[in-house]
Image (cartoon, rainbow, N blue to C red):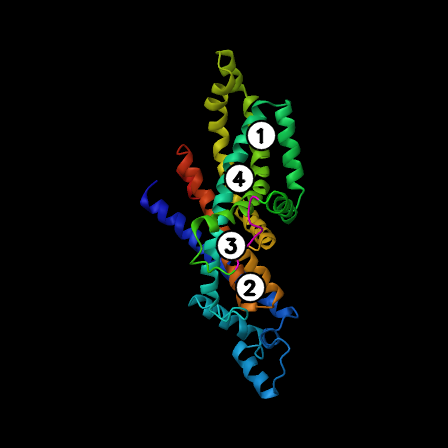
Amino acid sequence: MNKNQLLKFFGYKLIRFIILILVVAIFSFVLLDLSPIDPVNAYLRQAAVSEAQRQILENYFGTNVPLTTKIFHWLMDLIHFDLGTSLIYRAPVIDIIIDRASASIVLMAISWILSGIIGFAMGVVAGKNKGSWIDKAVKVYCYAIQSAPSFWVGMLVLMVFAVYLGWFPIGFGVPIGVKSTDATFMEWASRLVLPTITLSLVGLAPIAMYTRNELIQVLSSDYVLFAKSRGEKGWDLVKNHGIRNILLPAVTLQFLSFSELFGGAVLVEQVFSYPGVGQTAVAAGLSSDVPLFLGIVIFSAIFVFVGNLLADLSYYLIDPRIKESEFND
């Protein structure tokens, strides 16, 4: 792959990224503007003010101007990386997102890696032993966990390991009364375990079922039957002819699961009171914090776009046999 092809690819992705952010920003802004949410009332919190003071706040938040003007000002601020000021935290939205995103990214990254590795391994074992009790157990687990909401799984994990057994703290990112900067690594890590387990348990089901079904198809193909006739069998057969053919689509599916990962993190963080972007999004929605909520929407769009971009790149990093012409499509 030459330099021109690489530049063309990233240029095409950059154009798509700009269009995506514009569409998401405008669509989200219009929906919030049409909703009954009023930033002025959210800011005042039922405090009694004079009409002149309310007028000042309306001018500050821009609620008394036409919708097109609001959108234009919002996009201009977005270009300058100005997402406004949060009504809850009384701080710049971008600072809050950066602070909370670090906690969420650690949670999602560890969960994403664990769910990918464990899910792929479960799928390989189930596919190799099709029809056995192992295969049936994996299928039952995957079907059950896929039909269960992530917040319900989180509450079960919380009750078992934190309430009944008492092995881990109930929630929060650090102990109550301790600043995040003063917390030790073990105090922080012990509160990360249960949210990570919950998000991993939910995320590994799709990759496990997909890997199982793909491996079963591969093992029934003609070239695998030919390999069996030459004496190959067992794990050597799966390793040489199965994993090599199912690894690429499995990795791609895992990268494409970024949207589900973010959605699951929102619920899991709420269950465990974990101080990440997900819990902040819920707080912004309940408190009618429009600037913060819009900022998190933009962050989530960027997060999902990066996942899709990494999925595209994984094709060419894992399997160099793919034609370069596909890179330009």
| Part of the protein shown in magenta | 167-176
User: Which residue in the structure is indicated by mark 4?
Assistant: 115
Judge the density around disc 2: few (<14), some (14-19), many (≥20) Cα neighbours within 10 Å.
many
Q: Give the secondary structure at mark 2.
A: helix
Q: Is residue 135 visible?
A: yes
Q: Quadrant of the N terminus?
A: top left
10 Å crowding of disc 4: few (<14), some (14-19), many (20+)? many
Circle 2 is placed at which residue position?
293
Q: Which mark is residue 212?
A: 1
The tag earlier along the polypeptide, 4 or 1, is 4
Mark 1 and mark 3: Cα distance apart in space: 36 Å
User: Which residue is labeled 3 in the image?
Assistant: 173
Instruction: Tell whether position 56 is magenta.
Output: no
Which quarter of the figure has residue 134? top right
Inspect the image, locate mark 1, and give the three-letter code of the amino acid beneath it: Arg
Along the viewing direction, whichever of 167 and 26 lies nearer the viewer: 167
Look at label 3 and name its amino acid. Answer: Gly
On the question of residue 255 being in view, the answer is: no
Kindly report which numbered mark, 3 or 2, lies closer to the viewer in this rendering. Answer: 3
Question: Does 222 appear above or below 312?
Answer: above
- Residue 231 place in picture, x, y as percent: 49, 11
**For discs 4 and 2, the disc positioned in front in the rendered view:** 4
